[in-house]
Image: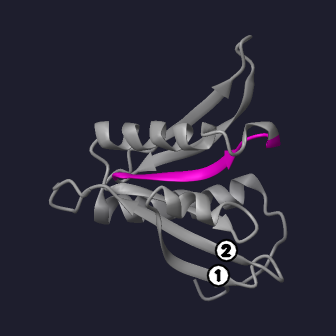
Amino acid sequence: MTDLRVELEERPGADDARIVTDGLLAFNRAVIGDPNEVPLGVFVRDASGRVVGGLLGHVKWGWVYVAKLWLPDELRGRGVGTRVMRAIEEYARQHECLGIYLDTFEYQALPFYEKLGYVQFGTLEGYPPGYRQFHLVKALRNEEGRTRE
């Protein structure tokens, strides 16, 4: 492999991206095992069953990641978000996950997550420009499987 080119591409093709993703996943599996990734959703539904908000995430390698949490303005401050987070926490406990991690921008819900016991483990300054992104975690167990309160 002496005639290699390194090329940067915006919006890379799916086939090219899949080679990198599949290669990295194979490498990781060889070292730490299968992630057993399971997509998760906690949905808030109105009386007709229509989704009006909720949470999207996944569980992988014994950790739950909360990727998105959104509620319309009229449901905020009424305990609905807390109920959504409690549902994902209960799932994590039932499945003996080590904990839950997430990120939030400074203009979003940092005090909400802190009130629920999440603690910051990192801050990305200037992301997006003029703001900060906070990374939070709530440990439920240690690696030996002992429950944390």
Real-space Cα separation, disc 1 to disc 2, in angstroms: 5 Å
Image quadrant occupied by the C terminus: bottom left
Q: Can residue 130 be spotted in the picture? A: yes
Amino acid at dot 1: Leu
As for residue 45 lying within the magenta part, the answer is no
Q: Residue furthest top?
A: 48
User: Is disc 2 surrounded by few (<14), some (14 to 19) or many (20+) residues within 10 Å?
Assistant: some
Viewer-closest of 85 and 99: 85
Residue 124 in the image: x percent, y percent? 64, 81
53 vs 3: above or below: above
Q: Which residue is mark 2?
A: 133
- Work out which quarter of the rendered image holds the N terminus and state it: bottom right
Residue 136 in the image: state x and y as whole percent: 51, 67
Q: Vertical placement of 48 versus 70: above or below?
A: above
Asked whether the residues under the numbered discs 1 and 2 touch, taking CB atoms below 8 Å apart as contact, a structural biologist would say yes
Residue at the image position 17 percent from the left and 54 percent from the top:
145
User: Which label was assigned to residue 81?
Assistant: none
Q: Position of residue 22 (x, y in %)?
A: 53, 56
